[in-house]
């Protein structure tokens, strides 16, 4: 399909720069393609009212690391300020990363991080550029290793806010908590699983009291989730790979939910992509540990997920393609138009949708 089929116009003022407080006060657009009208306006705190006893939430428990680093490259006495977003570790001291402006870097360059005065317990955090690749990507070899490096990154780095927020305001102390889910447990994400940002302990208590369970999986979200799709056609796009894990006990529990007639509700596109990667053709979920680069576009037949709770996504993004595959492109374009007209807030800190599938996608 052509990428421009997934385009839409969003007024800039609809982009949320801060989340709702409390988190579950965000608005919730329920989208049911097989009903007329297909849209219902609700609030996230009412989620238990639109689900059923026996349903199960599947939640990504990844934890966002402070992956945004600012440093200085010095070469022959000339300094250049470099912004780096870590993508994923390659070994104990080497990271794949995005650098801006990458054109100011070459193999062998040294970058000293903490230019704003932040230093870690070991002193200045420094790295050598091992390799420069295309699309702004570099391989960095840090001077520290293992746990020492992790601590240094946590001290010197900042929360890696997505570009549509970071371009309009700097990250601050509020983002340390706001850009992390309340159930974050496993370090490794360089972008938040934003659908999970809406959940609070009181909301979990209400859901549990209604007989709606929740189960945790892990998918370490990569910064590639925010990269624009440059290919003109979806078949020419190469999806970024992300590491995920579904434990055997979780797979068994989720298969049991479906066997009893319950529905699996993926909390976010990351949870959905992981479950679909772990499922066989019959929809049975198996233990999984490894990378997934599953790219879902219209025509995909969903096997493991019955409903999707997610945020509003960027135009022409792989995530908007995914939700269009789930509920139908025409329905999702109408849903987003409705949300814009009704002043919903968009993107990472914005409001949410609860999507039901279009009949032919299952």
Image (tube, helix red, strand yellow):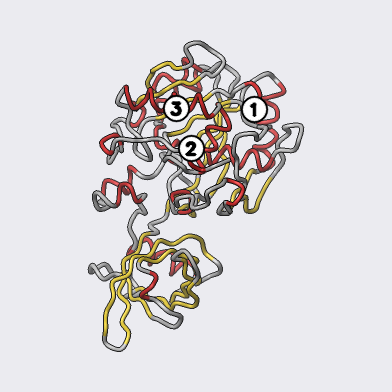
- Quick one: 346 or 349, which is closer to the camera? 346
Q: Which mark is residue 6?
A: 2
Q: Is residue 158 left or right of residue 242?
A: left
Residue 141: x, y in percent?
A: 47, 75
**Quarter of the image with the N terminus in it:** top right
Res 130 seen here:
yes
**Residue at the image position 42 percent from the left and 55 percent from the top:** 65
Q: CA distance from mark 1 to mark 3?
A: 18 Å
- The answer to whether marks 1 and 2 mark residues whose Cβ atoms lie closer than 8 Å is no
Q: Which mark is residue 331?
A: none
Within 10 Å of the Cα at label 3, are there few (<14), some (14-19), or many (20+) other Cα atoms? many
Res 253 seen here:
no
The residue indicated by pointer 1 is 361
The residue indicated by pointer 3 is 353
Mark 3 or mark 2, which is nearer the start of the sequence? 2
**Residue at the image position 65 percent from the left and 34 percent from the top:** 299
- Disc 1, SS: helix
**Residue at the image position 51 percent from the left and 22 percent from the top:** 208
């Amino acid at each position: 399909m052509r990428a421009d089929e997934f385009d839409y116009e969003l007024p800039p003022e609809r982009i949320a720069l801060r989340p709702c407080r409390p988190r579950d006060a965000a608005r919730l657009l329920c989208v049911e393609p097989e009903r007329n009208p297909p849209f219902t306006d609700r609030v996230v705190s009412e989620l238990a009212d639109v689900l059923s006893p026996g349903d199960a939430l599947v939640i990504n428990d990844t934890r966002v690391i402070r992956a945004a680093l600012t440093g200085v490259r010095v070469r022959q006495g000339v300094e250049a300020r470099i912004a780096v977003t870590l993508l994923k570790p390659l070994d104990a001291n080497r990271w794949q990363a995005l650098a801006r402006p990458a054109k100011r870097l070459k193999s062998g360059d040294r970058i000293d991080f903490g230019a704003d005065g932040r230093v870690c317990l070991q002193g200045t955090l420094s790295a050598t550029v091992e390799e420069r690749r295309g699309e702004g990507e570099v391989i960095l070899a840090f001077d520290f290793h293992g746990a020492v490096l992790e601590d240094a990154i946590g001290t010197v780095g900042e929360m890696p806010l997505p570009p549509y927020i970071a371009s309009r305001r700097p990250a601050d102390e509020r983002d340390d908590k706001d850009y992390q889910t309340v159930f974050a447990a496993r370090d490794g994400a360089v972008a938040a699983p934003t659908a999970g940002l809406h959940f609070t302990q009181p909301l979990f208590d209400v859901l549990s009291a209604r007989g709606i369970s929740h189960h945790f999986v892990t998918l370490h979200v990569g910064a590639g989730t925010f990269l624009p799709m440059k290919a003109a056609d979806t078949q020419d796009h190469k999806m970024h790979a992300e590491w995920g894990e579904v434990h055997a006990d979780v797979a068994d529990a989720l298969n049991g939910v479906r066997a009893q007639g319950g529905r699996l509700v993926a909390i976010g596109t990351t949870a959905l992509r992981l479950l679909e990667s772990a499922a066989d053709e019959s929809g049975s979920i198996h233990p999984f540990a490894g990378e997934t680069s599953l790219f879902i576009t219209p025509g995909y037949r969903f096997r493991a997920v019955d409903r999707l709770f997610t945020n509003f996504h960027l135009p022409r993004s792989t995530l908007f393609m995914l939700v269009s595959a789930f509920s139908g492109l025409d329905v999702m374009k109408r849903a987003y138009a409705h949300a814009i007209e009704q002043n919903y807030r968009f993107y990472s800190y914005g409001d949410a949708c609860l999507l039901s599938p279009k009949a032919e996608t299952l």
